[in-house]
Image (cartoon, rainbow, N blue to C red):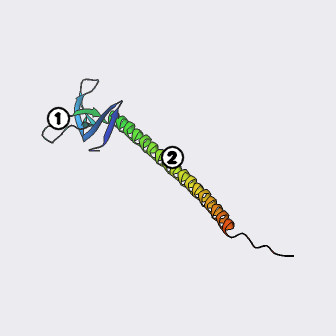
């Protein structure tokens, strides 16, 4: 789980490490809860300072934030794939248009060459 990206709304966090915390439950008793220490993306965290830099949340909340990050990543990946497909389609259409234009130019050039040849050397007349 260490290093996994989390999203809480517009805020991005990174899991430093998964850890259990002894907290007071609703009955006033101490209980061991599963969770993770996390920090804002880009912050420098070490073994020596993580308790000062990081916050701790229960595993259910951390899992929700991880799920949001994964959904955002999937959406971004889908958008990137769609953009790449659109770019490929555009390039293919441009290549087809260029090929058609070249074919038309070649045809026109061939016609012009044939006209020039016919003007220089008219066909011989034949008697019937």
Side of 110 relative to 80 (left or right): right
Residue displayed at 28% across by 36% down:
13
Say what secondary structure mark 1 lies in.
helix
Q: Residue at x 34, y 30 (%)?
A: 10
Height in image: 75 above or below 88? above
Q: Residues within 10 Å of mark 2 (few under 14, many from 20)?
A: few
If you read the primary sequence from the N terminus, does the residue marked by circle 2 or circle 1 appear first? Answer: 1
Taking 21 as reference, is 98 above or below it?
Answer: below
The residue closer to the viewer here, 37 or 28, is: 37
Residue receiving disc 1: 51
x and y percentages locating residue 82 in the rendered image = 49, 45
Horizontal arrangement in the rendering, residue 8 relative to residue 87 (left or right):
left
- Quadrant into which the C terminus falls: bottom right
Q: Is residue 117 left or right of residue 25?
A: right
Q: Position of residue 7 (x, y in %)?
A: 34, 35
For residue 46, what is the image quadrant?
A: top left
Nearer to the camera, 65 or 127? 127
- Judging by the rendered image, the residue that carries numbered circle 2 is 86
Left or right of 106: which side holds 5? left
Q: Quadrant of residue 21?
A: top left
Q: Which mark is residue 27?
A: none
Q: CA distance from mark 2 to mark 1?
A: 47 Å
Horizontal and vertical percent for residue 115? 67, 63
Quadrant assignment for the N terminus: top left
**Secondary structure category for the residue under label 2:** helix
> Viewer-proximal residue, 21 or 106?
106
- Mark 2 vs mark 1, foreground winner is 2
């Amino acid at each position: 789980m260490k290093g996994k990206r989390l999203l809480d709304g517009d805020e991005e966090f990174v899991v430093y490490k998964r850890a259990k915390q002894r907290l007071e439950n609703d009955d006033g008793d101490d209980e061991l809860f599963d969770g993770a220490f996390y920090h804002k993306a880009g912050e420098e965290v070490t073994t020596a300072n993580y308790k000062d830099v990081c916050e701790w949340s229960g595993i259910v909340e951390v899992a929700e934030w991880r799920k949001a990050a994964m959904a955002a990543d999937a959406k971004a990946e889908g958008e990137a794939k769609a953009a790449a497909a659109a770019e490929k389609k555009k390039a293919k259409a441009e290549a087809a248009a260029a090929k058609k234009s070249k074919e038309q130019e070649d045809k026109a050039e061939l016609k012009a060459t044939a006209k020039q040849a016919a003007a220089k050397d008219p066909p011989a007349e034949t008697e019937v």
